[in-house]
Image (tube, helix red, strand yellow):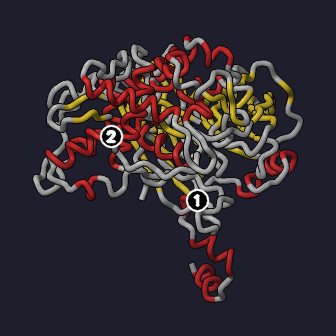
Amino acid sequence: MAGPMKMRATLGQGYTDVRVLMTHPMETGQRKDSSGKLVPAHFIQNITVRRNGKTVVEAETSQAVARNPVFTFRIQGGAKGDRIEVSWVDTQGDTNKTEAAVA
Amino acid sequence: MNAVRRLLLQGAGALAASLLAPLAALAAWNKEAFGAKTPADALKSLGVAGAQPSKDLLIEAPQIAENGAVVPIEIESRIPGTTSLTVLVEKNPFPLNSRFTFLEGALPFVKLNVKMGETSEVRVLAQAGGRYYSASQEIKVTIGGCGG
Amino acid sequence: MKLTAAAAAVAVGLIVTPAFAQKSPYADYQRMAAENAPIELYELAGEEAWKQKQGPKNASLEQCDLGQGPGVLKGAYAGLPRYFADADRVMDLETRLVYCMTTLQGRSREDATKRVFGNADKSSEIEVLSAYVAGQSHGMPMRPGTGHPKEQAAYELGRALFYHRAGPWDFSCASCHGEAGKRIRMSELPALNTAKDSQPLMATWPAYRVSTSSFVTLQWRMNDCYRQMRMPEPAFGSEIPVALITYMTVNAQGVVYRGPAIKR
């Protein structure tokens, strides 16, 4: 069950700034828990950013991205009300997505 | 479908497990490159050759990170026609960190937090017009004390 | 809007702070990490918890009086710790939240405090509530209560505790935090008995702690310091941690609050 995700899309100088906060353990598979057991790898592998339904950014990420990742992307131009969607898929097939209108 | 069933019935271990993984998770994730243990192997798996250093590929990152668990990095390519940015943390157990592909409308820019196991060069590659360009910066990672 | 303003405020705050940020080799790291921190997620979770009806009285915390009147959140954190007549004691944010949980929601103290400190996987209710409430004081000068006799007594108790050596290592808070310019390995130690060093610290709690990927509060910090000094951990929300928090906040008074923030 994916944790909360939050995104804010604002207009910058000739571009749309997209900042997205994700909740995810991004476990490397090398960490040991308090009982000494290895915590299995579990991390976001793919992120997709869409504007008005069109894919603009595709990312492949690894376990070496920090826990509870925060990403900022920029899309050329844009206008208030544009629909931005950010979604992710992880190693367990779990997914999450969030949508926001450009402010 | 029959092939999958056969493999599962034969208990083909890892292969079966990977086939069981949802298709979405299999899509577009370069397992070989992400599993490479040296920067050279990662670049080879990605098909990157002859990357030229470029001053138009900008990395903004702290020189010293107080904690290697979260190291903020900002990357911007001013090279015209940049279609992707690839991030490597050279001394990490698996150097390939992430790869971003920019389709029509996206600017070749990204800000993210990476994990660093130790002081290392962070290398960025930009792909533009069929060529690769590179830039790098060393980030020192210190061991802190206690407290908050 | 608030997110960028918060990040900018943190960045500006860190740059103008005299002793620490200018000397600190970590200034760039702290600025960039703050801009890239997941703090907002905790504030949002806290807002949800604040509005959630709970307990035998099936009530939310929305009528909780944090010192500025029932339900008034703006500036409330900046006015804490302070004396509350209804409880007849000095309270910090977390103590006051528990008070509201028991009085407004009818929950037992045991229920309200059964999990006060969370972890990376799941924050505690008090942690997210602290993030939300503290965020509502962002940009405001910190003015803890200092006029009431009990507030003054709390300050004096806090100061006495700060210098009181005990435990197997004969440590006091002052052992690490009583002198300017000290460090443990590569972490700088603020002299919390001075305004100069306590100000940037008190202005940035509660916070997202990068090394544990979790959101932490002052009650947690007090508890953990005692643990690190190999002393028994003080009871949550009791007179001891409240007195220490009062001591440090009063030392820092006047500083503009710029949290919730990010810490190593």
Residue on which the image places disc 2: C94
Return the residue found at the far left: C57
As displayed, is residue C115 above or below residue A73?
Answer: below
Describe the element under mark 2 as helix, strand or loop. helix
Graded by Cα atoms within 10 Å as few (under 14), some (14 to 19) or many (20 or more), the crowding at tag 1 reads: some
Residue at x 61%, y 19% (from the top left corner): C20
Q: Nearer the viewer, mark 1 or mark 2?
A: 2
Residue at x 31%, y 20% (from the top left corner): C146
Disc 2: which chain?
C
Residue on which the image places disc 1: A42
In the picture, the quarter occupied by the N terminus of chain B is bottom right
The amino acid sitting under disc 1 is His
Residue B52, can we see it?
Answer: yes
Q: Position of residue C262 (x, y in %)?
A: 52, 32
The amino acid sitting under disc 2 is Glu
In the picture, the quarter occupied by the C terminus of chain B is top right
As displayed, is residue B13 above or below residue C14?
Answer: below
Q: How far apart are the two marked residues, 1 and 2, measured between alpha carbons?
A: 34 Å
A57 sits to left or right of C9: right
Residue A52, can we see it?
Answer: no
Q: Position of residue C77 (x, y in %)?
A: 32, 27
Quadrant position of residue C256: top left
